[in-house]
Image (spheres, rainbow, N blue to C red):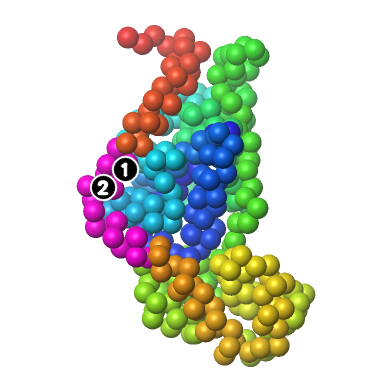
Amino acid sequence: MRIVSGIQPTGNLHLGNYLGAIRNWVRMQDDAQAQGGQCLYFLADLHAISMPHVPGDLTSNTREMVAALVACGIDPERSILFNQAQVPQHAELQWLLNGTARMGWLNRMTQWKDKAGKNREGASVALFTYPVLQAADVLLYQTTHVPVGDDQKQHLELARDIAQKFNNDFASEDAPVFTLPEPFIPAEAARIMSLRDGSAKMSKSDPSDMSRINLTDDADTIMQKVKKAKTDPEPLPSDKEGLAGRTEATNLVGIFAAMSGESVEGVLTRFGGEGFGKFKPALGELLVEKLAPINQRFVELRGDHSALDAILKSGAEKARTLALPTLDATYNALGLVRG
């Protein structure tokens, strides 16, 4: 088993990032090691330049993301942690795969349509070919499994299509160049919503800081945000069916369940019939308890640029070593002469 996953270095990590992705990365790291497998986690800084960005912010956000991942439990000694820009084989393989990918395939990508909006003529070429770089990200390492959410299933299907077509066109059935990666859907991939709007995902782009729990928030800030989170006037129900149509209540109960390791039903058994005046303080205390060690470690790490750069450099060296055989095989399959 070889698992590969990436995350854009956007900075300001919040509870949604932790429960939706990072915590599962830690679990996958532990499970893969127990099975003799391997995890590669990368900061997708090459993907970040497909949209307008501030160079200085990209540099600082990349370091901050490394600090957050390590603080949350990613161990650079057990997983390979790196940023794309230090492994040029990602961009190199993308160019080679551009000959196999088809315009029609990319035109159908939902995220391309969403991000480009009505101004497709003004969007960057990088944004259009973004999914080919994603394919290169995983095919480069003979990846067997890729953790995916609903918003990434289409991109993994594209990676498989590209790999299959390349193997059919340029390799023999007995010796394919690329492994076709399988989707890996984590058992628990919590979808955390805004504290101000239960119908919108928790996001760093929300103008209201009260809409999210940041990993940098101290105990007092966390308690304040939870107490001011939007709710309805009804008490909590005693069963899951009673949450129907109550988006804010569903979100807060879901956060409690995810952080405590209980089921939603278990949380409602405990708090059913109670008002939010009792539930919110309990949720705030739970968040403070679970996030305090992460916050402390993150604050310690993010100021140590030398240590963070060393982690990225070491991970990139390991990643380049793994990437070279696949890249060489791709050049050879295409008949390209290299010195």
In the image, what residue occupies the spot 29% across and 57% down?
A: 302
Where is residue 315? Give x, y as percent.
Answer: 36, 37
Q: Is residue 198 above or below residue 324?
A: below
Residue 5, percent from left and from top: 50, 43
Q: Are marks 1 and 2 in contact (CB under 8 Å)?
A: yes
Asked if residue 327 is positioned above or below residue 291 in the image, the reply reads above
- Give the quarter of the figure containing the N terminus: top right
Give the structural element (helix, strand or loop) at label 1: helix
Report whether 219 appears left or right of 303: right
Report how many numbered discs are placed on residues in the image.
2
Lateral position of residue 69 relative to residue 114, left or right: left
- Identify the residue shown where x is 51% and y is 44%: 29
For the point 61% across and 29% down, the residue is 180
Helix, strand or loop at mark 2:
helix
Residue under numbered circle 2:
307
Checking the image for residue 295, the label placed there is none
Position of residue 22 measured from the top left corner of the image (x, y, whole percent): 49, 54
* Amino acid type of the residue tagged 2 in the rendering: Ala
User: For mark 1, what is the residue?
Assistant: 311
Q: Is residue 2 visible?
A: yes
The residue carrying pointer 1 sits among few (fewer than 14), some (14 to 19) or many (20 or more) residues within 10 Å by Cα, namely many
Please tell me which residue lies in front, 110 or 27.
27
In the image, the segment drawn in magenta is 295-313
Residue 100: which quarter of the image?
top right
Q: Nearer the viewer, residue 7 or 265?
A: 265
Q: Position of residue 168 (x, y in %)?
A: 63, 17
Q: Is residue 122 visible?
A: no
**Residue extending furthest toward the front:** 34
